[in-house]
């Protein structure tokens, strides 16, 4: 699967000392970066239910909470709570030589012509 990804350097320093939910801009995409209890995740920034900006949400017990309708998403798998029937996209995050990188799937254009 790694050959399907393009790794993009995170342009700003990532705070590893506290918990947060905030916006992350990488490769022309607005993503959501989350740190809760030492777990770091990168997700899509829009709630699939009503399009709310998840970067204005918060975490409780390993779940990212949507600020509009309180939909809850697991910050490791992206899966919504059972009765929601939805999920958010997760992006892999890795650290190399003190820098963080987000993996974004190659576009069809890049697969064909890249």
Image (cartoon, rainbow, N blue to C red):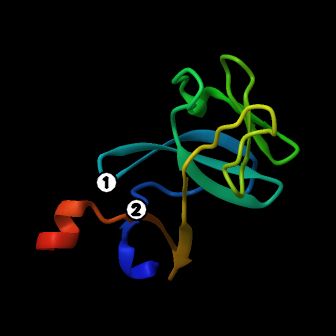
Q: Is residue 8 left or right of residue 109?
A: right
Residue 65's disc number: none
Count of marks overlaid on the render: 2
14 or 79, which lies in front?
A: 79
Circles 2 and 1 in contact, beta carbons < 8 Å: yes
Label 2 to label 1, Cα distance in Å?
9 Å
* Quarter of the picture holding the C terminus: bottom left
Residue 106, compared with residue 35, is above or below; it is below
**Image quadrant assignment for residue 27:** bottom left
Q: Check disc 2 and report the residue beneath it.
A: 104
First in sequence: mark 2 vs mark 1: 1
Label 2 vs label 1, nearer the camera: 2
Q: Which residue lies at the image location 55% right of the left edge and 75% below the top edge?
A: 95
Picture coordinates of residue 5, whole percent (x, y): 39, 71
**Image quadrant assignment for residue 12:** bottom left
Picture coordinates of residue 32, whole percent (x, y): 55, 43
Q: Which residue lies at the image location 44% right of the left edge and 79% below the top edge?
A: 2
**Image quadrant assignment for residue 15:** bottom right
Q: In this view, which residue lies farthest toward the right?
A: 61
SS state under label 2: strand
Residue 27's disc number: 1
SS state under label 1: loop
Residue 82, compared with residue 2, is above or below; it is above
Q: Which residue lies at the image location 54% right of the left edge and 49% below the top edge?
A: 89
Q: In this view, which residue lies farthest toward the left?
A: 113
């Amino acid at each position: 699967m790694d050959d399907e990804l393009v790794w993009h350097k995170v342009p700003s320093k990532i705070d590893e000392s506290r918990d947060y939910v905030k916006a992350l801009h990488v490769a022309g995409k607005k993503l959501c970066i989350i740190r809760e209890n030492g777990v770091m995740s990168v997700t899509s920034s829009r709630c699939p239910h009503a399009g709310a900006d998840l970067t204005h949400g918060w975490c409780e017990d390993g779940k990212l909470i949507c600020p509009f309708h309180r939909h809850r998403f697991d910050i490791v798998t992206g899966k919504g709570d059972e009765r929601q029937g939805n999920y958010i996209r997760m992006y892999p995050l890795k650290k190399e030589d003190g820098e963080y990188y987000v993996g974004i799937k190659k576009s069809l254009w890049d697969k064909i012509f890249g």
